[in-house]
Amino acid sequence: MALQLFKLVVTSSLTETQYFYTASGDLTFSGTASVTLAATSFFDDAGSGITTFTTATTNGYYTVEVAGVLQQTDLYAVTASKLTFGNAALTASYTIAASSPITLSVTEPSITS
């Protein structure tokens, strides 16, 4: 019986784009009241203003940190033009304190073989 060996080589890399915002006042959201932050109010890692967020593709994902604390994905939604906190399923209200830094990261994997 002939035996043949295969060598599988997979190369992958991650590209992460980060956007930054500082809350100018208390931001309170719940199931009935959402808070929307326009992409134009964020800055990139070079300190430049932006017009839109990079959108995550099929295998990409978003993460949001408020004051350095990673947020659950059901607390926010991201589109190319805005970051929205709150959704209809929330039964409690949440407040992001004024001056809290908000970081949105868009991570895109790239897999080649």
Image (cartoon, rainbow, N blue to C red):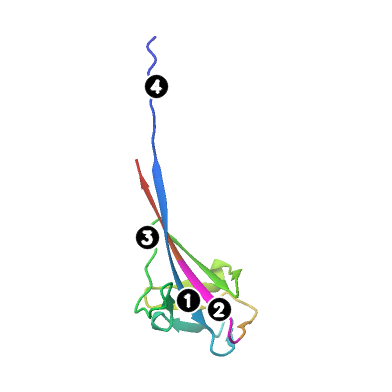
> Where residue 94 sits in the image (x, y, percent)?
63, 81
Q: CA distance from mark 2 to mark 3?
A: 26 Å
Residue shown at 46% from the left, 82% from the top: 37
Q: CA distance from mark 4 to mark 3?
A: 34 Å
Residue type, mark 2 in image: Pro
Residue ID for mark 1: 20
Q: CA distance from mark 2 to mark 1?
A: 7 Å
In the rendered view, does 28 fall on the left or right side of 106?
Answer: right
* Label 2 SS: strand
Locate the N terminus and report the quarter of the image it occupies.
top left
Q: Are marks 4 and 3 in contact (CB under 8 Å)?
A: no
Residue shown at 52% from the left, 78% from the top: 85
Mark toward the viewer: 4 or 1:
1
Residue ID for mark 2: 101
Q: Residue furthest top?
A: 1
Residue ID for mark 3: 57
Q: Are marks 1 and 3 in contact (CB under 8 Å)?
A: no
Which is more N-terminal, label 1 or label 2? 1
